[in-house]
């Protein structure tokens, strides 16, 4: 393991020598020459990889193999835990020095990520992501969480995963800064490295990272892992996790263990609730092709439910026509009132794309008096 150099003179000499050496090898095509096809690389960074006992007032310095298009450092580099950048100064478009708003956190392992995709002055993009740790304490944290991400029976090769701490009840997990990010390799494997001993419990969110903005998009497969993870050993193998396209239906099920209307056949189905749907009324009901009969003590399963918010609809088929019907309460022509067949709904069950979900059967109304449709109420 490498140690921090306390001599600023020695450090400055090293950086100057490396800068001159790399500068001589800068790959810029002369006027009229062949186009540059060699991607830029990060060749020198300070503090160095695996450096320990790094002073908390350190400046961060990065040197590239050739001239790159200068951008703000917070658009190029990610630090975990997050560091507030005060300023970044570029030298000859090849070296950047980063000054922080506050000192580095003491006795902490800090992970630096430079994602691929930044460009040299000729517009050629870097093809390697650099990830490395250094520590302001005496040692680098050494625990890790590994696993594999798949989709459609194959590896997710452009996946991004975020590691979160369990949030307070008052906020959502993603309203916090992630503790780490990790990318999948060509086989779909990921590795959260340099985590503390006895860390967690953690949440992991994964998504297919197609557009490069490092945020899950509406059209990108996204999944919050179902179980919390605690760092109870140095290496945690999280196994394989499947993510699904946003439009993939899930499965909804329940055990029918509450009494149903006697001597009547009950049908049930699910309906997807759209964002702009008006409040539901019985007038909206049509008998769909996926309706199924329900019996006491059955396991009721809907295989094409969701994704998103759904409702479950039940009705008792009083007149045995297999349709949700409006019935008269009397044969008297001067006093007839109309009613819907007995029914109930269970609202706002959220189903993640491709995932199973369960719900609890709501008790059937004590009175089996159907509701009167607003459109048929008598004055």
Image (spheres, rainbow, N blue to C red):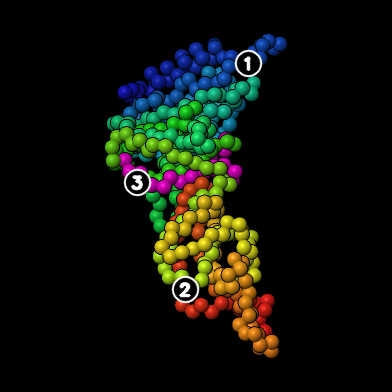
Query: What is the spatial separation of the Cα atoms under label 2 and label 1, in whole angstroms?
Result: 80 Å
- Give percent across and percent down for residue 355: 48, 48
Pair 2/1: label in front? 2
- Percent coordinates x, y for residue 245 in the rendering: 56, 43
Q: Quadrant of residue 289?
A: bottom right
Regarding mark 1 in the picture, which secondary structure is present there? loop
Q: Nearer the viewer, residue 263 or 160?
A: 263
Q: Quadrant of the N terminus?
A: top left
- The image quadrant that residue 379 belongs to is bottom right
Residue plotted at (43% across, 20% down): 12
Contact (CB < 8 A) between labels 2 and 3?
no
Q: Which residue position is annotated with label 2? A: 262
Which of marks 3 and 2 precedes in the sequence?
Answer: 3
Is 220 part of what is drawn in magenta? yes
What residue did someone put label 1 on?
Answer: 36
Residue at the disc numbered 3 = 201
Q: Position of residue 164 (x, y in %)?
A: 42, 45
How would you rate the neighbour count of disc 3 (Cα within 10 Å): few for under 14, some for 14-19, many for 20 or more?
A: some
Relative placement, left or right, of 293 versus 139 is: right
Residue at image point 44% right, 39% down: 241
Residue drawn where x is 42% and y is 68% of the image: 258
Q: Dot 2 lies on which element?
A: loop
């Amino acid at each position: 393991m490498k140690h921090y150099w306390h001599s600023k003179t020695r450090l400055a000499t090293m950086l100057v020598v490396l800068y001159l050496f790399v500068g001589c090898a800068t790959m810029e095509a002369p006027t009229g020459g062949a186009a540059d096809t060699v991607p830029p690389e990060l060749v020198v960074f300070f503090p160095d990889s695996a450096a320990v006992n790094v002073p908390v007032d350190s400046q961060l310095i990065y040197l590239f193999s050739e001239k790159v298009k200068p951008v703000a450092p917070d658009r190029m580099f990610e630090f975990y835990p997050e560091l507030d950048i005060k300023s970044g100064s570029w030298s000859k478009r090849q070296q950047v020095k980063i000054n922080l708003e506050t000192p580095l956190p003491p006795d902490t392992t800090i992970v630096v990520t430079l994602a691929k995709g930044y460009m040299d002055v000729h517009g050629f993009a870097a093809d390697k992501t650099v990830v490395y740790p250094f520590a302001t304490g005496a040692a680098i944290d050494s625990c890790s969480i590994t696993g594999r991400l798949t989709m459609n029976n194959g590896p997710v090769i452009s996946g991004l995963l975020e590691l979160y701490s369990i949030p307070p009840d008052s906020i959502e997990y993603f309203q916090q800064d992630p503790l780490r990010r990790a990318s999948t390799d060509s086989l779909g494997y990921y590795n959260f490295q340099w985590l503390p001993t006895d860390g967690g419990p953690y949440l992991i969110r994964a998504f297919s990272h197609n557009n490069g903005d490092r945020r899950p998009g509406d059209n990108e497969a996204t999944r919050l892992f179902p179980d919390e993870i605690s760092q109870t050993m140095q290496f945690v193998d999280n196994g394989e996790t499947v993510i699904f396209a946003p439009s993939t239906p899930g499965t909804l099920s329940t055990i029918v263990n509450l009494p149903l209307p006697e001597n009547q056949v009950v049908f049930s189905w699910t309906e997807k609730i759209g964002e702009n749907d008006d409040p539901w009324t019985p007038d909206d009901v049509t008998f769909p092709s996926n309706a199924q009969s329900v019996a006491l003590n059955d396991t009721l399963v809907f295989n094409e439910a969701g994704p998103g918010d759904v409702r479950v609809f039940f009705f008792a088929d009083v007149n045995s026509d297999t349709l949700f019907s409006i019935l008269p309460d009397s044969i008297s022509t001067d006093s007839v009132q109309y009613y819907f067949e007995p029914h109930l709904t269970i609202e706002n069950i959220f189903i993640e794309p491709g995932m199973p979900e369960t719900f609890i059967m709501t008790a059937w109304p004590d009175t089996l008096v159907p509701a009167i449709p607003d459109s048929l109420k008598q004055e």
